[in-house]
């Protein structure tokens, strides 16, 4: 599982933008849509699965367990209030990817071993994408979580191209971005720039 350029979709995204991001170098896609019905999200997830599977790019569903199960997506990403990791793992089964959002180092202590495959840590910086987010943890907070974690950690929250070198220095496995790709004039080029920067900063 390559988490380096982890594209999280905004509400109502067009399939074409997702595919452009993947052509550019996005290594994983999380379908997140707070306003769509389950039925609409399942339909979109199924379309994307067909397009992404030959490219070897996993599709993860944000929050909605039933959508993940019914669409055949590669996995699920949940927050702190979406059910326990143990419950989600039991429902998903052992073979699908499960990601969990972490906002503080203290929350790390509550994850049962063997339940999650990666952690999304953030927000690193304040972000307009999620106005009700927790206090930003900065690079120092991210590094602390990376050191505590027994699974890969993906950074999220207000990050972009200029942050790649600092993120790599913390030991993070990747960066999750929304507007850095979806808000770009050319999403494919934006994803390519992120992928190139991540690879160059090893």
Image: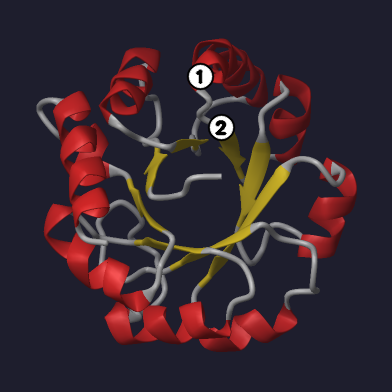
Q: Are marks 1 and 2 in contact (CB under 8 Å)?
A: yes
At x 67%, y 57%, the residue is 117
Question: What crowding class fits label 2: few (fewer than 14 Cα within 10 Å), some (14-19), or many (20 or more)?
Answer: many
Q: Quadrant of the N terminus?
A: top right
Can residue 125 be seen in this snapshot? Answer: no
C-alpha gap between disc 1 and disc 2: 7 Å
Foreground of the two, 133 or 158? 158
The x and y percentages for residue 91 are: 87, 45
At x 42%, y 37%, the residue is 27
At x 33%, y 60%, the residue is 131
Residue 148 image-quadrant placement = bottom right
The x and y percentages for residue 102 are: 54, 71
At x 62%, y 14%, the residue is 46
Q: Circle 2 sits in a helix, a strand or a loop, which is it?
A: loop
Mark identifier at residue 160: none
Residue 152 image-quadrant placement = bottom right
């Amino acid at each position: 599982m390559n988490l380096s350029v982890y594209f999280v979709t905004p509400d109502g995204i067009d399939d074409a933008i997702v595919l452009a991001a993947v052509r550019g170098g996005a290594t994983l896609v999380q379908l997140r849509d707070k306003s769509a019905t389950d039925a609409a999200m399942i339909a979109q997830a199924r379309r994307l699965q067909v397009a992404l599977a030959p490219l070897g790019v996993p599709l993860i569903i944000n929050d909605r367990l039933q959508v993940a199960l019914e669409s055949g997506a590669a996995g699920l990403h949940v927050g702190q209030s979406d059910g326990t990791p143990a419950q989600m793992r039991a429902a998903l089964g052992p073979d699908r990817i499960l990601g969990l959002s972490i906002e503080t180092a203290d929350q790390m202590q509550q994850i049962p071993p063997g339940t999650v495959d990666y952690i999304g840590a953030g927000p690193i910086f304040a972000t307009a994408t999620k106005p009700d987010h927790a206090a930003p943890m900065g690079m120092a907070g991210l590094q602390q979580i990376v050191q505590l974690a027994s699974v890969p950690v993906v950074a999220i929250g207000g990050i972009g191209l200029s942050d790649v070198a600092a993120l790599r220095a913390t030991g993070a496995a990747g960066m999750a971005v929304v507007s850095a790709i979806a808000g770009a004039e050319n999403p494919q080029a934006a994803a390519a720039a992120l992928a190139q920067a991540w690879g160059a900063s090893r």
